[in-house]
C-alpha cells in the first residue's frame, strides 16, 4: 500500500518546527538550562512533539510498506532498522528516544533533566537523519 505523503509531510513539519525551537534552547549553558523551568518545560514539550511525530511516521511506514504493526513505540524503529529503511545505529538511537518519550508522558514528575540536556546536545541530528531517510521513500 502507498505511503500517505501528506501525513508524512505534516509530521516532518512538526519535527522541523520542534527542532528549530530546541536549537534555540541548545544555546543555554548546562547550568542555565537546568535552572530555567521555562526552558525545561519547552524542551520537554518540543522533544515530545518531535519524537511523537517520528513515531507516527514510523508506524505508518511499518503498516503501509512492511505490513507490520509494532507492539510498542521503540519496536517500531527496530523494525525499520531490520528492514534497512534506516541504519541500525539510527534505529537504536531512536528506540532510546521512544523510551525517553514514554518517560516524559507517563513519569513526567521524574524527568531526568540532565539526560534531556544531553539528548538536545547529542541526538537532535538523529531526528534529522530520520526525516531524510523517510523522505527518500517518498
Image (spheres, rainbow, N blue to C red):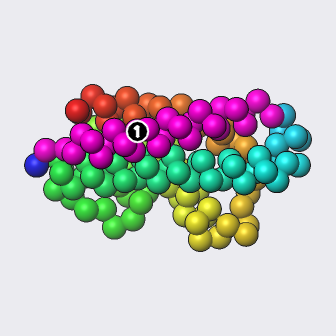
Spot occupied by residue 83 in the image (x, y as percentages of width and height): 25, 43
Q: Which residue is drawn at 68% across and 47% down?
A: 43
Extreme residue in the left direction: 1
Residue 76 in the image: above or below residue 132: below
Left or right position of 68 against 92: left
Q: Which of 113 and 81 is in front in this view?
A: 113
Q: Which residue is drawn at 53% across and 51% down?
A: 49
Disc 1 packing (10 Å; few <14; some 14–19; many ≥20): many
Q: Does the magenta stretch include residue 116?
A: no
Q: Nearer the viewer, residue 5 or 1?
A: 5
Q: Nearer the viewer, residue 113 or 50?
A: 50
Q: Residue at x 53, y 31 (%)?
A: 125
Q: In which quarter of the image is residue 5?
A: top left
Total numbered badges shown on the rendered structure: 1
User: Secondary structure beneath disc 1?
Assistant: helix
Q: Does the magenta stretch include residue 4?
A: yes
Left or right position of 42 against 127: right
Inspect this view and state whether residue 74 appears: yes
Inspect this view and state whether residue 82 appears: no
Residue 111 in the image: above or below residue 21: below
Magenta-highlighted residues: 2-28
Quadrant placement of the C terminus = top left
Spot occupied by residue 72 in the image (x, y as percentages of width and height): 39, 65
What's the magenta bit mostly, secondary-structure-wise?
helix
Spot occupied by residue 119 in the image (x, y as percentages of width and height): 64, 42
Residue 24 in the image: above or below residue 110: above
Q: Residue at x 18, y 51 (%)?
A: 64
Query: Disc 1 marks which residue?
Result: 12
Spot occupied by residue 17 in the image (x, y as percentages of width and height): 53, 37
Q: Quadrant of residue 80?
A: top left
Left or right position of 50 against 57: right
Amino acid at each position: 500500500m502507498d505511503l500517505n505523503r501528506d501525513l508524512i509531510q505534516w509530521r516532518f513539519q512538526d519535527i522541523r518546527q520542534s527542532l528549530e525551537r530546541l536549537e534555540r534552547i541548545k544555546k543555554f549553558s548546562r547550568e542555565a538550562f537546568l535552572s530555567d523551568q521555562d526552558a525545561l518545560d519547552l524542551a520537554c514539550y518540543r522533544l515530545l512533539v518531535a519524537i511523537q511525530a517520528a513515531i507516527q511516521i514510523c508506524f505508518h511506514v511499518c503498516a503501509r510498506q512492511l505490513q507490520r504493526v509494532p507492539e510498542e513505540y521503540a519496536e517500531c524503529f527496530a523494525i525499520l532498522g531490520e528492514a534497512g529503511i534506516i541504519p541500525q545505529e539510527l534505529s537504536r538511537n531512536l528506540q532510546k528516544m521512544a523510551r525517553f518519550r514514554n518517560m516524559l508522558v507517563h513519569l513526567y514528575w521524574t524527568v531526568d533533566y540532565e539526560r534531556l540536556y544531553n539528548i538536545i546536545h547529542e541526538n537532535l541530528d538523529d531526528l534529522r537523519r530520520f526525516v531524510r531517510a523517510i523522505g527518500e521513500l517518498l
